[in-house]
Image: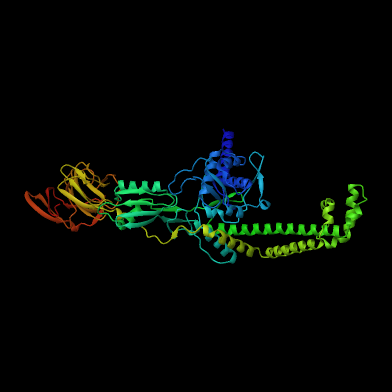
Amino acid sequence: MDDLKAQMKGHFIQYASYVILDRAIPNVVDGLKPVQRRILETLFRQNDEKLHKVANIVGQTMQLHPHGDAPIYEALVNLANKGFLLDRQGNFGNIYTGDPSAAARYIETRLSPLARETLFNPDITQTIPSYDGRNNEPVTLPAKIPLLLLQGAEGIAVGMSTSILPHNFSELLEAQIAILEGRNYKIFPDFPTGGIMDKSGYDKGRGKIKLRAKIEIKDPKTLLIREICYGTTTESLIRSIDEAAKKGKIKIESINDYTAQDVEIEIKLPRGQYAEELLDALYAFTECEVSLNSQIIAIKDGFPWETDVHEILQFNVTELVGYLRRELEIERDRLLEKIFYKSLERIFIENRLYKKIESVKTLEGLHTTLSESLRPFHKKLLREPTQEDREKLLQIPIRRISQFDIDKNKDEIATLEKSHRDVEKRLKNVKKCAIEHLRALIEKYGSEFPRKTKIRSIEEVDVRAIETKEITVGFDLASGFVGTKVTGASKLSCTNFDKLLLLSKDGFYKAISIPEKQYFEKIVFAGVADKKTILNVVYKIKEGGAIFAKRFVVDKFILDKSYRYIPEGAELECITPCPNPSVELVYTLKGVLKRKVFAFKEIPVTGAHTKGVRLINQKVRKVILLKGKL
């Protein structure tokens, strides 16, 4: 059994780690989950700037992804609909209506220019073997834009989940420039579905935002919904409006969906209802207003990292500077290598060193002679020639030697040296290069991604105030029925949010929600459970006949639970909620009938479970309520 427990524990930990690291949570470096990264890598390898059948890309991606084709297809469609990394042709579904995409064999895609420019560089991409060892796949892509915040992400793993809201392209890059320049900045979400956002609770991505649909008043009896909340569809929004209407929260005459390329939902109102008055109710009871929580968890250095927007941007800026530095260093090394070889070639041809090897018979002798011939020129070269360099010289054809142009060679070297100086200059200030890079991206692509979600303060809708309705509750003490559909002699005005307080003759009370019609046994009082009404009660102890009075307020209760307000074994004589009532006690003293009037105001107000005050020591024959009859 212990071995089984240990095995189960080990397998669970492996499964949880796999789901967190390789399935559900995106990597902070490139903002991608593994399946998304494999799709993009496949598209990069297949890239010829022509559109590819999605079915083909899905099949090619299966060489890297150890699961079925369905999740690859779904991830590709989702990635394409975010609108940044993939160009689309065909029906990829509709983010507004929730309509699904066409089959993979009917739609086509390719990398967008933004993706090709900012995500790939094989020279600085670390790779690992794929699941079957037949291919290599990138650990992460060298993303030069904050893709995690740009696209947003949702993921549920074992014991954790992430919810990262999408942001605006230009604003993210401007924020990165501010970080590089040491300035303060603010950044807030931007949703592809538009809407109106209250960002006051965002807290750098650790809080939540309130989002509203954009609703226009076409005329006093017609509303048009032009933009919807992120995470909803026109179908779910219309369903929520229908449900609110069925529950009586709102009144509408008809609702029509004319959504095509843009959202357009028309709401017609019945007689007595006006568009201006319905807005708050739509926000309160339908998906015209939603709250979105932001909880940012990403994979960093192989572990989950709970963070915020500003820390991610700082991390991405550091990564960007590192990528640019490595690219400049690689470019510098390539330029130096070109300068070295062109200089070596010129020395070889200009000084006719090839003449010295014409009579040498062996390959070893060729290298030895050429090495000795080049030795006096080492000071003119950036480094000493290697055997590989000498091999390249030996492979130069005679025709190229005879047509060699020294002036052209010098010009080419001068151009390369100028490029090298420029690279060295940029390496000394990589931050400046990063700023120039970001500004160039904003200028090139910024106009393609304008802000769609408007930011403004949203006042809290008082749902209770909107939903509160004056109702009349009838109750018949003789029959015991209480409710809105009871036509008894007694009426009670209250609101639909109030609770009813019922007291029975046998000494119990309970608080209930207002029913349409319900029977209660031995009911003697019905009122609003407002926790402030003072009830005046006279009761008699059956054994001995002692008379007690009490004044109390029912201020604590659990709905539908019965409580005692007079002791067990007592009998209720009278009850009234009227202020300052009085009772007449009829009793016999030494054979003479006596009467005594007692005012309740002399008794302090207590709780419902407190024992009453004894009114008289004599045995009371009758209790008469004089003042305060219901």
Q: Where is residue 272 in the image (x, y as percent from the top left)?
A: 25, 54
Nearer to me, 387 or 448 = 448
How many badges with numbers are in the image?
A: 0
Q: In this view, does 269 lie above or below 412?
A: above
Does residue 364 appear left or right of residue 451 in this picture?
right
Q: In this view, does 195 lie above or below 70?
A: below
Q: In this view, does 271 lie to the left or right of 96?
A: left
In this view, 325 is above or below 519 = below
Task: Name the quadrant of the N terminus.
Answer: top right
Q: Residue furthest top?
A: 1
Answer with left or right where residue 615 lies relative to residue 173. Answer: left
Residue 277 image point, x, y percent: 30, 57
Which of the pair 394/334 is nearer the observer? 394
* Colour pattern of the rendering: rainbow
Furthest toward the right, the residue is: 359
Residue lying furthest left: 592
Q: Which of 606 and 79 is in front in this view?
A: 79
State the residue in front, 578 or 375. 375
Q: In which quarter of the image is residue 174?
A: bottom right
Q: Is residue 393 visible?
A: no
Q: Residue at x 88, y 47 (%)?
A: 363
Location of residue 344 by image quarter: bottom right
Q: Can residue 181 be seen in this view?
A: yes
Residue at (49, 42) in percent of width and height: 102
Q: Is residue 495 left or right of residue 151?
A: left
Q: Percent position (x, y) of residue 287?
A: 38, 50
Q: In x, y percent, where is residue 17?
A: 58, 44
